[in-house]
Amino acid sequence: MTHPIAWGGTRPTVIAHRGASSEAPENTLAAFDAAVEAAEDTAETQDPRRPVWIELDLQPTADGEVVVIHDDRLDRTTDGHGLVRAHTLAELQRLDAGGWFDGRRAAGAARAYAGERIPSLDDLIDWIVAHPVVRVLVEYKGEWAPADITRTVAAFEAAGVLDRLVLQSFQPGTVDALRLRAGDRPRGLLIDMTRRYPEVELARLLDVSAVNPGWRRVVGETADAGLVPAVHDRLGARVAVWTPDEPALWDALVAVGVDAIITNRPRELRSHLG
């Protein structure tokens, strides 16, 4: 198996979904800063042995560059329109990726986010280098060509940050391409809310370090009670669950033994876990 991931212990690791996306516009440097600040507000995270974990999404651009954004389309989180992959990096970085969030801020919020930009891969790497406490769960959105994966992994290697990353995807082909390019670096297989194939067996074949399901696969009426034990016992791998945001769900996930919780509310989850 690939390198184990240092999640879990006495309680699940907190992973900030697209940064602290309840406090700042998702997948922007502002959201990543907010995730670090949220962690620093608790005494426990002053311990340098406890890194701050952030989850984010990568997509390629029309001119072969890479940006940090979740949706295939620009419309929800920017003032642009159309497919991300149909635009060049220069075109994407002219868009406002923060103004949409200002309209949803609570009254009296500390700052406005209009003018935040979609980060490029270089912007992301520079930010990771500047924040040595940070570890990153990187999702490759959709199917990626091996050559595009090679460029991203080479950039992470050149900057000396690859050993601070876990690389994941929903697409088995992309996970396998990551295996071929990133060697024994930790990788994860994302699985959605409904069982569609023998996921644990597939994860074994892909030799991943983590199987990361939607929370309904683990707790609730449609839960698969055997999923977490199977990942732990048959694979020796970790489980990070996305994206529960309510205390009752957090408690239920702790009870079934997940290793990490990916949430939009990392500050509240840290407080809830005590």
Image (cartoon, grey):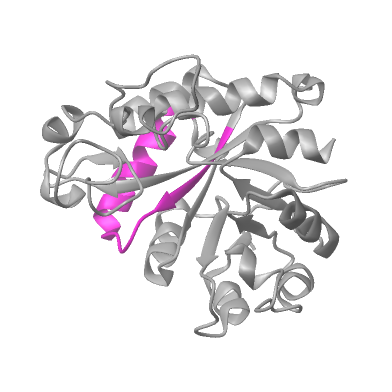
Q: Nearer the viewer, residue 187 or 247?
A: 247
Q: In this view, does 129 lie to the left or right of 174?
A: right
Residue that lies at the very extreme toward the right in this rendered image: 10
Vertical order, 94 against 232 (above or below): above
Residue at 38% of width from left, 70% of height from top? 173
- In the displayed structure, 33 sits above or below 180; it is above
Left or right of 100, for residue 128: right
Q: Does the magenta stretch include residue 238?
A: no
Q: Residue at left 77%, top 33%?
A: 271
Q: Position of residue 161 (x, y in %)?
A: 49, 32
Tell me the magenta residue range. 135-160
Q: Residue at x 70, y 75 (%)?
A: 227
Viewer-proximal residue among 150 and 133: 133
Which residue is farthest front? 107
Which quadrant would the N terminus be assigned to in this image?
bottom right
- In the rendered image, is residue 270 in sight? yes
Q: Is residue 213 visible?
A: no
Where is residue 250? Give x, y as percent: 74, 52
Using the image as rendered, state which of residue 109 and residue 182 is in the foreground.
109
| Percent position of residue 121, x then y | 32, 34
259 lies left or right of 242: right
